[in-house]
Structures are given as C-alpha cells and as structure tokens.
Image: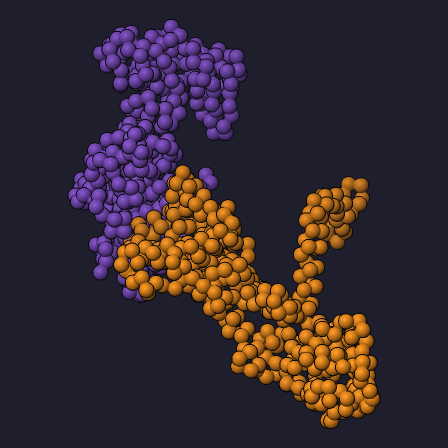
Amino acid sequence: MTDTPEAESAAPVASVPPETDEIFARFTNVQKSYDGVELVVKDFNLDIRKGEFVTLLGPSGSGKTTCLMMMAGFETPTHGEILLKGEPISGLPPHKRGIGMVFQNYALFPHMTVAENLSFPLEVRHLSKAQIKEKVARALAMVRLEEFGDRRPAQLSGGQQQRVALARALVFEPELVLMDEPLGALDKNLREEMQYEIKRIHASLGVTMIYVTHDQTEALTMSDRIAVFNDGVVQQLASPDELYERPENAFVAYFIGENNRLMGEVSERLGDDCKVRLDSGDTVIAKPVAVGGVGSRTTLSLRPERVSILREDAAEQFDNQFTATVQEVIYLGDHLRTRLSVCGNEDFILKTPNAQGFGVMRPGQQIQVGWSSADCRALDA
Amino acid sequence: MSDSAAPLTTADGVPLKVSLRRAVRRSKLKALLLVSPLLLFLGIAFVIPIFEMLSRSVANPEVSTHLPRTVAALEHWDRQALPDEPVFEALVEDLREGQAARNLGLLASRLNYERSGMRSAINRTARGLGSMEPPYREAMIDAHTRWGELDTWKLIEREASPFTMTYYLSALDRQLTPDGDITMAPDNQQIHVSLFWRTFWMSGLITLMTLLLGYPIAFLLANLPLRHSNLLMILVLLPFWTSLLVRTTTWIAILQSQGVLNDIMVFLGVIADEARWQMIHNKIGTVVAMTHILLPFMILPLYSVMKTIPPSYMRAARSLGGRPFLCFRRVYFPLTIPGIAAGGILVFILSIGYYITPALVGGQSGRFITNYIAYHMQTSLNWGLAAAIASILLCVVVVFYLVFNRLVGVDKVKLG
C-alpha cells in the first residue's frame, strides 16, 4: 500500500548516539554534467553513517546542491552510484525514496493550511485519519507550533514557516533528511535559534541528516562532519574542529574561519618543521602540511587568534617573532580587530580580547608579534 | 503625537493636508493632461456612440412625432369600440402631412414590427389620401381593413409613449398582446433565445477546448529553459501578427469538403470520396476556427500564473511521497486555478461577442447572436432590436465580469 517502509516504522527513539559504524548512505565516484562539456560534480565519494549530521559546505556553484538533488532523485548522476542502505537508488523515482527534504524557500504549499501541509505526506501513504491527526499534532509540538495548524503559510513569519517545513519533512518519519540551505532566508538571530532547534531535533530523533550551506559558521556549529566543496571536488572531509585547526589546503583554510596568508617558498626542511622564505625576505618557521620539497611555492595559513602581541620586557616565547606596524584598529565590542603590516602583508589581522591587560593600540605604532610554528601551516600555493 | 486633537501642520503653519494636496496637484494635472487625448478620442468615438446606439433599444419616437394629432385625439378614447370620426380625421391630417414630408416609411415599419399588415395599411391609405372625402371613418376602413380593427387603435395608443420595451421583448422572443400582456412570439418567429443559448454553450465549449489545448503549452512555456520557451512564446504570439481574416479563411481551405483534410482522409482511405465530412459552415467549423483564434488568450494568463509557481513545490510534493499525477492534482493544479479562471473568462467573453469568424465559417447552424445583431443592423434595418440584443449581451458580459471579479479578482488577468 505504501511506497516506503519508513511509513510503518516505529515512533522515533530518543537520543540515539550518532556514532554507529553502519553506513547508511554512500556516494561512489559520482559525476554530474548538465551540458556534456563541464563537470559540475567531479568524482564525489562520501560515506554517511546512520544518525550522522553531514554538511556539504562550499561557495555557490561548487556542486553541493547538485549532490543533494541527486540523493533526492531530482537529478540523475551522469556517472557513479548512490547507495541507500546498501541498495543502489538510481532507478528509484523521488517519491519512492522516502527521504525527507527541506527546501531553500521552504516550498510550503500556499493553498493548504499548516496542518494540511503536514498531513500531505501521510495522506499519500494512506494512513488512517486518526493516525494522521496524531502524527501532525506530534510534529507541530516538536517544532512548538501547536497553535498554528489552521493558519496558511503566508500568515506565518519566516522562522515559523521554516519550522513547518522542518516538521513536514519529518512527519512521515524518514530515516534520512536532506536540507538545502534551509536557513538562508532568515535573519541572523533567527538563524542561530533555528540552528540549535535543528540540532536538538536531530539529537532527539536520531535521523541521518545531509545539510547544504555556504555559511561556514552554520556548518561548524551543527555538523558531525563537513565536506568542503569547491569546483565540484571535495577539498576536505572532516569534523569541524579538524577542519578549523588542521586545514589540508589553502582553499579550506581560506573558506573556514578567518585566516592570515603569507606567500613564499620553502627554503629548508627541518624534521617536522620547515623554513619558508617569504616574498618580503623574512623567514618563517612553519609546519609543512601540503608542500613539496625545497624551492616549492607555498601559502602559509595562520589564524588571527593564534598571533600574540609580545611585551617588550617579555622573554622570547615563540619561534616566529616580527615587528609589525599597526594600520587600523576596529572596535567590535567583545574583541578588537587590528590590521597590521607585517612581513610585507598589509592585511595581517590580529584579534585581541577587549579585556584588562591588553593595551590600546594606535595606528602607526610599532609592536612585536609572534606565533608558534605549530599554528602556522604551510599549504599549497 | 501627544496632542492628537490638533490637526497636523507643516513648519510654516499650513495644515498638512492642504499642503499635501497642493504638492500633488501639479502631478495630477500632468497625468490628466497626458491621458486627455485618448480620453477625448474614446469619448467621442466610442462612449457617446455606444450610449446613443444602446438608447435606441428603448426609444420609441415614431408614433408620437408622426401622428401627433391622432395621439392627442385618442387621449379620451375608451378602448372598448372603434374611435369616433374626430380621431379618424386627425389621422388623415397626420398622414397627409407625413405624405407631403415623405417620412411615413419609418412609421409604417415601426407599426409593422408590432402588427403585420400595418405597412401596407399606411402605404395604401396614403396613396389614396388626395381623393379622400369625409366622413373619414368609413373612407379609411374602406381604404384598408386594418383601420376597422380595434387592435390597430390599441397599438397606436400604446406606442404613443416615447419609450417602449417591445424591442427587448422581441429580443427574447416575446411580444405584447393588444391588451398589453406579455406572451411568447409565434413558434416560427422564435429565434433569438435559442441563438443566445447556442452562443453561450458554444462559447463554453470553445473555452473548454482552449483550456485543454492551452494548459500543457502554458506549462511548457513556464518550465522550459529560457532559450526554448522564448521560441515557443513566439509561436504562441505568431497568430497575433496574422490577419484574423487570413486565419479564418485558412480554416475554410483546410476543412471544406474539397479541402485539405478531406482530401487526405480520402487519400488514406479513411473515408469514401462520396462521404466527405462536412466540417465547415456548421458548428464544427465555428468551434475549430474560434478555438484556434482564441487559444493565445487562454495560454497567456495561464502562463503568467504558472511562471510564479516555483518548481520546488512539485519537488517538495514528490519528496513527500506523492506520485507525479497526485502531486499535480493536489499541489500544482490548485495553484493554477486563478490562471484557468482568468483565461476562461477572457476567452468566454471574447467568444460570445465574436462576429467575423462565425459569420465566415459558421454557416446557418454555427452562427452566433452577434451575427443577428449585424443582420438587424445591415439588412432588416431594425436598429432598435439590434440595440436591444446588444444590450442584453453587454449585460451578460458585465454579470460574468462581476462574478469573476468577486471570485478571482480581475487583477489576476495578466498577459505575460
């Protein structure tokens, strides 16, 4: 009677730990081309464990949404296979995949009330009236919109519409939920609130989620693992802290978080470290991550918060120390952003907390800055 | 904000409303000036003639202007027996005057609409007026038997009023008895009501046909990539660049019994040469040609509505587990109803007022009420009746428009 086994599955179990080793969905060597000339997705591989929250992060046009649409069944891979619970799903039309989906602009049906929107997936699965009523009420309670069942989507605020869209994607208890930039249309405060809301629901239902966004903060807050996309290729697939602390290439370092870049070439390898001669002539000791031998070009990546200001009387603590000129100080409330000129880089950013012990700097002032070679990663040029 | 009782003023003390009115007066004047040439043109060439024409549906000047003495003399008539000699004398004088001015024709036609034989009664009597001697009563009855009938005089008395409803009655196949009751016209003269019905149901059929043919095209237009949809849009608009007459007569070439379609059918052996289909100069011809001609008026409003429906609605419905047809029925179709209503009302209203196509390809059985308006304007010269039919048609259109505006809203009609 129903197209999907999920429809009959039991009520969601609370707090399933996300870390099980069962592979739930898998992309193998997926390629996609729309025009036969250019590949939008090049050789995409991804294993998703049951209950995991995986984010596809990347700039627009990087192929992340295309991957999501292939999973949902609205696009067919040009090459490769997508497996769901071990079964290839290329031949399966979207309505038989049993995957919940939240769209960028919610795609709530404007001619139906909220409750009718939520009962749609249950009606097409031929559930009884009583069951539908109960499940709709439960889904509305989950997103805290019990009172809004009789409203039309147009009568709701953006955040409420977003909750309804979420409830609708979950009401038929799919095991996998796809989200295509679902918070893109919300303002900042609401977006943060919804991020926690989605995390909470994910944790309590134990569903597997694939989330697409171009907002790195969103990706870092919500995900178990993040696949950073660029140019149709996954640049790095890792947990948020791994991505931030240990970016494997210049794109990831640039895309995730703020990042100071120094260009130069490797002049000497010293065991675990390397010496890099910058274009300005200075020499920096850095941690080689993605560099070739002596003489190869490299981009040094350094997080602004890992750079320290050295007092004149302090003993030497860092293996990299330079004199910098303050260019500009930007007041941001809880912290100060200071733009420095150091090692030939005019846009070297330094973040200092707005707290006691950190003196006020003025443009033109000369200061000493230093950083550890462990925080300075030598990446591809 | 605190003293809300005092009217708001600008800085120099002028009330805000006055100041605002002054500020917008200039731009209002400018707007009026810009539309005035068109307004003037429409007023002179369109609004005034239409009202003049429509007023003819109730105007009834013939008897009162051509038989003033008779009307005056009939004022005290008891309607029980034939009038007395003075009335006949007044009639003779009126007719003599009319004969001299040579304008008895209008009067004769007007009375003949209501009572056959009146034209010959007036014409024959008028020819013999010169030699007519008193007592006129006997002489007139002698000249034509109609003058000796009570109903003739009742008619003249009734039609002395400057307004009449008889045009509307005959537009609806009804007539007045001599005593002023409304009855059905004789069976062989009942024609307009059935024509009205035919116009309505055939227009409905044409609307339905344009919907069935236009809906998929509009869907394609709204969903194809821009490059292809532009080409398709040109094909949809192409008919607008071709003369209506050309499009209509092309259908004659295709559908007539020696035409292209019949030839192909005979060639393929589907039908015998002797049994060619009669597809033109009947209802089929009208429906086919008008469906073709009015199709763009259905496609464009549908397209403008479909364009605003994001494809993510259908995708959402599919991802929620709906089969394609169910998604269409539950999600897409309901969202296109404003477009269907807009296209439907546009095609229906255009269709009930269509004239040239039914006239050319409709033959006898495929003709619309508009063709009878033209007939009464051009051939029978009964402008009053033509005006009455046209007014009824106008009222029907206005009613449809109001209902549509109430249910859907006329601002939904967009052509692109």
Q: Is residue B230 left or right of residue B142?
A: left
Farthest residue toward the front? B131
| Residue under the point 27% across and 35% down | A32
Relative depth, front residue between B152 and A55: B152
Chain B pictured colour: orange
* Up-down relation of residue A238 to residue B218 (above or below): above
Q: Is residue B70 left or right of residue A146?
A: right
Quadrant in which the N terminus of chain A appears: bottom left
| Residue under the point 72% across and 75% down | B107
**x, y (%) of residue A112?**
41, 58
Farthest residue toward the bottom? B81
* Up-down relation of residue B284 to residue B43 (above or below): below
**x, y (%) of residue B207?**
45, 61
Residue B258 occupies quadrant: bottom left
Residue A379 occupies quadrant: top left
Q: How many marks?
A: 0
Does residue B333 appear in this view? no
Q: How is the image coloured?
A: by chain
Relative depth, front residue between B242 and A320: B242
* Up-down relation of residue A133 to residue A6 (above or below): below
Chain A pictured colour: purple
Relative depth, front residue between B255 and A198: B255
**x, y (%) of residue B296?**
47, 52
Relative depth, front residue between B145 and A212: B145
